[in-house]
Amino acid sequence: MRYFLLFFLVGCCFSEESINNHRFPSDFIFAAATSAYQVEGAWNEDGKSPSLWDTTIHNNASFIEDLSNADIACDSYHKIKEDVAILKTLGVSHYRFSLSWTRILPNGIGKVNEAGVAYYKNLIKELKDNGIEPFVTIFHWDLPQILFDMGGVINPSFVDWHAEFARECFRLFGDDVKLWATFNEPQQVCTGGYGYGYFPPAIKSEVQLEYVCVYHVLKAHAKSWHIYDDEFRSKQNGRVSLALDTSAFIPATESAADLEAADRMLHFMLGIYANAIYVGDYPEVVKTRVAARSAAEGRNQSRLPELTQSEIDYIRGTHDFFGLNVYSATVAAAMDDPPVSDPPNKWGEQGVNTYQPTDWEETSIDGTKVVPWTVQSLLIWIKDNYNNPGIIITENGYPSKGDKDDRRVHYIRGYLSNIRDVMIDHGVKVLGYTVWSLMDNFEWASGYTQKFGLFEVDFNSPNRTRTIRPSGEFYKKVTETRCLVDNCVD
Ligand SMILES: *[C@@H]1O[C@H](CO)[C@@H](O)[C@H](O)[C@H]1NC(C)=O
Ligand SMILES: *[C@@H]1O[C@H](CO)[C@@H](O)[C@H](O)[C@H]1NC(C)=O
Ligand SMILES: *[C@@H]1O[C@H](CO)[C@@H](O)[C@H](O)[C@H]1NC(C)=O
């Protein structure tokens, strides 16, 4: 294989980076992503009811770093033509966006709000008129408040609520949507919302309610997939999966114990969802450790709700691709098991020390360091553990405070190059790549302080003017040439 060599200066030293010079396949998906809550605004327009995020922020402004909210955000609810025009500028084949549950079903379940449906129908039509395929996430964190009031994701009924919403989405939009994700990053819902508690509803119940959430998410995903499979697939011919997020984990040394620690972290972070869907049941190491620690805590059953054989069979195989959100990596080092604690915690559960070396390039977000080469081992791990699925990178992107866009180019090119490498060298089936994000938007608890956009958005202007960044120009060139360097080989 021939490589184009690019030399650049890092700190004190000369370092070398090789960029893959093989053209991406003609059917490779190049996409850009947003989510409803982060861009739409119009939080109470046309019959939309509040989501858990709306009420949390409205009740407590200090939940958000810059005391902002998403009431207007990028105003995408009123900017269908502008949003599709900037996607067209980028030359992407797909736009990944999500549906606001409370815009479509203001009561969470039941009656459909036609005005909300019209927004998405118009968006999808405008996309297709411009040759862009919709890639739709059904649930990207903005749970209806009305369902939260009834227990939200930790009520077993959540499984049916999600599945009913999914059925409506397939019915309403499925003739025009061929790619679906039932969930975006359920780990952020379960661990963020019920584990560490950094996202609404901000309940700190590490490895307890957090696991109840995981259990319901798995069943909800599976039920929604089966509904598609049974009722829609033969007419609509789409693909349904979900987008799972993980860090890559790099063993601290090549010792067996550190290799095992890195493997264990992936099973806890990614495998707790993916294993059930792609293999069947939770990963053995997760089940065993949680059961043992639960017993040592004096419990009569595992904190991780057991899957019955019929649940295992029902969840196994509910995928048509593997959606992966990945931004960075972490070093994993073995350690002696910590004693059990009350309340239990994730660190003890996993039994791994994690850290990021100081010489990894920083971004504006702690823990999101720039290490594109680490995606190779992660993708190979997914190939090896989940029976070589077709993988779509459903998110990858670089945060800044609005500066350092050249480092965003470096980041995106680095990830794409390493992805192309493992496709060729290891036969990993990567089907597509999605940049987070199409444009700067409401970055959850960080408000507008973190910027990921290929387009800058002027949040001081009522027009929310979008302006392409050099990284957007770079991505446009990639989508045009399917190539990361000046001259590619096929
Ligand atoms: C508001 O949010 C902040 C930041 O998450 C938190 O520390 C505080 O306890 C919250 N206040 C209330 C009343 O919930
Ligand atoms: C486990 O203990 C709880 C009380 O701590 C009890 O309600 C439950 O029935 C017990 N379960 C089994 C399987 O024994
Ligand atoms: C917003 O857009 C309108 C219509 O294009 C234009 O007339 C106006 O000057 C813009 N306002 C700002 C603040 O950019």
Image: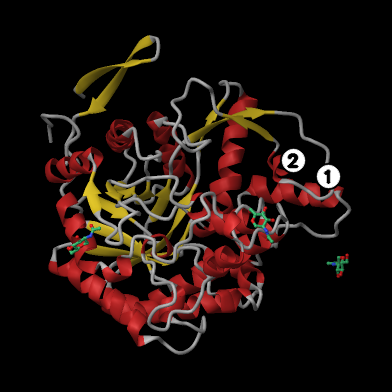
Where residue 55 appears, as percent x and y from the top left, is 57, 69
- Tag 2 near tag 1, CB within 8 Å: yes
Between the C-alphas of marks 2 and 1, the distance is 8 Å
Mark 2 surroundings: few (<14), some (14-19) or many (≥20) residues within 10 A:
some
Mark 1 surroundings: few (<14), some (14-19) or many (≥20) residues within 10 A:
few
Where residue 228 appears, as percent x and y from the top left, is 39, 75
The kind of residue on which mark 1 rests is: Ser
Q: What residue is rendered at 38% in x and 49% in y?
A: 395
The picture quadrant where one finds residue 82 is: bottom left
Q: Is residue 327 visible?
A: yes
The kind of residue on which mark 2 rests is: Gly
Label 2 near ligand 2 (CB < 8 Å): no
- For ligand 1, the image quadrant comes to bottom right
Residue 91 left/right relative to 76: left
Quick one: SS at disc 2?
helix
Q: Which residue is mark 1?
A: 341
